[in-house]
Amino acid sequence: MQTNDFGFNFDHSYARLPASLFSVVQPEPVPHPQVVILNDRLAESLGLNPEALRSGAGAALLSGNELPEWSLPLAQAYAGHQFGYFTMLGDGRAVLLGEQITPSGQRFDVQLKGTGRTPYSRGGDGKATIGPMLREYIISEAMHALGIPTTRSLAVVTTGEQVPRERDLPGAVLTRVAQSHLRVGTFQYAAVFAKEDLRALADYSLERHFPQLAQEENKYQALLGRVIKAQAELVAQWMLVGFIHGVMNTDNMAISGETIDYGPCAFMDTYDPKTVFSSIDQDGRYAYGNQPHIAAWNLARFAESLLPLLADNEEQAVQLANEELAQFAPLYNQFYLDGMRGKLGLTNREEGDSSLVEDLLKLMHEFQADYTNTFLDLTFGRFQASPLYQSDGFAAWKERWQDRLTRGQQSLELVQELMKQSNPAVIPRNHRVEEALRPAVSKGDYSLVDKLVRILADPFAHSAEQVEYAQPPEPSAVPYRTFCGT
Ligand code: AMP
Ligand code: MG
């Protein structure tokens, strides 16, 4: 480990894993790197110096142009099921620089995304463009502020180069910070292409994320159980805020339980379980309402990869895997229902809570209500004229809810406080994200991006300046679309 002006204090534990799991690569030089957004608070929490990172030397580092000798750029190997089909993947446009050991002793991957070709690039150019990198910055930081585990964004640097896409676009590099980049797909890769290294990968994952499991009788089974639990909690949190990941391929599911890979993700405005934004998700595999089911499917792929480690006898291994997988649904339901209780101001558990939630969602669906704002309206008792609030169905539901609140025996102030902390005033609405990105991409004007990031940084503040950002988009003839890997 070595220190420097930036405050980096790198270790390279991943590079000590078997060589099959990564390739050392050199980022491609770029003409004119410039830091366009930097996350001061994240930098400081990592023990980094924001001023140094903003300097020319910082831009050279964060673009991969001038890498100090204490970095060890490598691309990680992984495979994955993409839309259900298994394929070899790997970091095709990203390099891990190292693992930052923070002043409090935590370990975080520092990865550059968009630094050019790697051995896993297949047909791609390894580059990234400014729009999608800023989009990842905005949405991942919004997720963090919502209290949802996620990879973070430290900086976006423009490269001074034009990257050919549907048209030429400004090139950019995102610095992503993560508890690790170990994915379900990393295990699938080892299980299929590097069988002899599977145990080393699993041991490494245990040590890095779940050191307390080392003493378990069957630590690999315990690993599976913990990943299942982390994902059940994560996906429940997505559902509670109306987040649609958009590309829940197994390579985009992290062992740590952090949200990873902000490609075609987006937040739902009008409540509809079938909501899909991704242009390539024709069949709605990754629709809002399918996410828990897909998470369980991905976890079954994780369990399959671990089979050789679970028991010597395959039949027994399958049985252990199934025991763990069976935990996903009850865990998910519990996390989700408890979260919904918070959103409705319920401080205790009752049998009928699940149908209270479902009936509200049915009404929201029927009357095409805005998901986020309906919960805000309930929080603040604002029932302006709208088809939902004028319906008999809602009147009956509201009465049930009020009765239920009475049985909770909490003061109205406490109920409202719980609801204010459970229902965000703002989410990164698609039309606001697009509005901020447009001038950034077309003329390098980042002021709206900065403002949006600031508004989204404290979603439970319920401040006056958040009100206009809470407005849903004007109805549009063209549905909102998002894109992968651009
Ligand atoms: P994603 O859709 O971001 O999960 O990416 C799927 C795979 O495509 C990963 O292996 C990426 O590294 C790779 N990939 C995405 N964009 C590019 C690119 N421009 N060049 C090379 N590989 C890429
Ligand atoms: Mg990916």
Image (cartoon, rainbow, N blue to C red):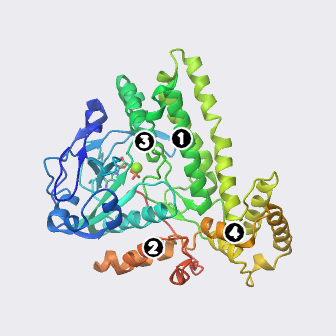
Numbered label tally: 4
Identify the residue under disc 3. 183
Answer few, some or many: residues within 10 Å of disc 2's Cα (few below 14, many 20 plus, some between 14 and 19): many
Helix, strand, or loop for circle 4? Answer: helix
- Determine which of the numbered discs, if any, sits on residue 433 in the image: 2
Judged by depth in the image, the label closer to the viewer, 3 or 4, is 4
Q: Position of residue 315 (x, y in %)?
A: 59, 18
Identify the residue under disc 4. 414
Give the mark, 3 or 4, whose residue is nearer the N terminus.
Answer: 3
Residue placed furthest toward the top: 313
Helix, strand, or loop for circle 2? Answer: helix
Identify the residue under disc 1. 298
Q: Amino acid at mark 2?
A: Val
Residue found at x 28% / y 37%: 13
Helix, strand, or loop for circle 1? Answer: helix
Indicate left or right for 361 with 128 as reference.
right
Answer few, some or many: residues within 10 Å of disc 1's Cα (few below 14, many 20 plus, some between 14 and 19): many
Look at the numbered discs 4 and 2 and tell me whether their residues touch, using CB distance below 8 Å. no
Distance (Cα) linking label 2 and label 3:
28 Å
Residue 400 in view (yes/no): yes
Look at the numbered discs 1 and 3 and tell me whether their residues touch, using CB distance below 8 Å. no
Give the mark, 2 or 3, whose residue is nearer the N terminus.
Answer: 3
Judged by depth in the image, the label closer to the viewer, 4 or 2, is 4
Q: Amino acid at mark 4?
A: Leu
Distance (Cα) linking label 1 and label 2:
29 Å
Distance (Cα) linking label 4 and label 2:
33 Å
Distance (Cα) linking label 4 and label 1:
39 Å
Look at the numbered discs 3 and 4 and tell me whether their residues touch, using CB distance below 8 Å. no
Q: Amino acid at mark 1?
A: Asn
Q: Is mark 3 within 8 Å of ligand 2?
A: yes
Q: Amino acid at mark 3?
A: Arg
